[in-house]
Image (spheres, helix red, strand yellow):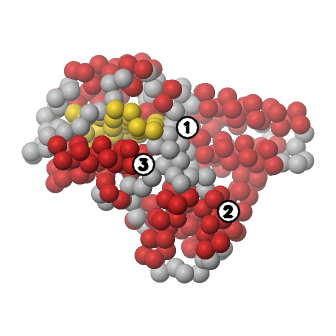
Amino acid sequence: MLWTEKYRPSNINQIVGQEHFVMDAKSWIEENNMPNVLLYGNPGNGKTTAGIVLARELLGDNFKDNYVEVNASDDRRLETVRTMIKNIAQSGTIGDAPFRMMLLDEMDGMTTDAQNALKRIMERYASNIRFIITCNDRNKIIFALQSRCANYHFKPLSNEAISEVLAKILQGEAINRFSQDELDSFIYAMNGDMRRAITELQAAKASNTTLKKQIEINLDDYNKLLIKITNKNTNALSDIHNMLHDGHSIREICIGLHDATIDAKDLDSNLKFKFLRTLGESEWRSTTMTPKVLASWLIGQLL
């Protein structure tokens, strides 16, 4: 079992590093009511987890029948909003739930037309459903949606917050072979990304490697991918698809390639500039392309 699931917070008090959201969420749970919310910030900061935990606490035993999760970056079409999301929004609750709840994950991947359609649904069926929207870049969410939600910035987690969670995992898994200095260096390298920290820790446990070696393995994956790209090896696209399948976001992959490009000492300066420019453009194109389509575009530009 993935540790990101095994050690996912089960109640609102277990969410770390996002006190502003937790404080308001507690009041919503107490009042049995909430606004639509928009959670934004870098990947790995707990936005999706916070949304799920909030829904579980508000809906209680009615969670399974009244909660729906949609990855908006995978299904960003206008037709999805007009059919599936609308049908759910206009249907009544099951049991004694106060309303239905829908988590729209990675909403910044949804088209502008689809977002406008969602705004109308949000207004029309306000008594039936509450939406929890997550995104990395709030600027890619139309203002009409932003203004209809309570907005919460999920900032990168502090080293102390990550250390607290990893300590509980190490205790739960009876692991004591990592020194505090090794853990501190490992946590620093995670740049506030809790999900990555937990994933890399589990990988180090599974492969019986040191945390330092695990970080090097991760960096080596991107160095190998960069070499394939510079050698015009079309298998690079399959490698990116495999990374997406393993749970890496397209943004995380672009950051990894960016860092590998910066560190590449043997890469021609003109080629390095081309790669960095293309990786930067991929961020803008992520608003109109699914991750797999964007990966194909990216490799097409780099090869």
Find residue 215 and name its label. Answer: 2
Q: Residues within 10 Å of mark 1 (few under 14, many from 20)?
A: many
Find residue 291 and name its label. Answer: 1
Residue at position x 29%, y 45% in the image: 25
Q: Report the amino acid beneath label 3.
A: Gln
The quadrant of the image that shows the N terminus is: bottom left
Find residue 303 and name its label. Answer: none
Residue at position x 84%, y 48% in the image: 264
The residue tagged 3 is 18
Disc with the residue nearer the chain's start (1 vs 3): 3
Eyeballing the image, is 153 above or below 170? above
SS assignment at label 1: helix
Q: Report the amino acid beneath label 1.
A: Pro
Q: Is residue 64 visible?
A: no
Q: Residue 230 placed where, x, y %?
A: 82, 43
Disc with the residue nearer the chain's start (3 vs 2): 3
Eyeballing the image, is 182 above or below 130? below
Going by the image, does 220 lie left or right of 24? right
Q: Report the amino acid beneath label 2.
A: Ile
Of circles 1 and 3, the one toward us is 3
Among the 4 quarters of the image, the one containing residue 76: top left
Q: Residue 90 placed where, x, y %?
A: 19, 28
Q: Report, in whole angstroms, how far the alpha carbon at label 1 lies from the one at label 3.
A: 28 Å
SS assignment at label 2: helix
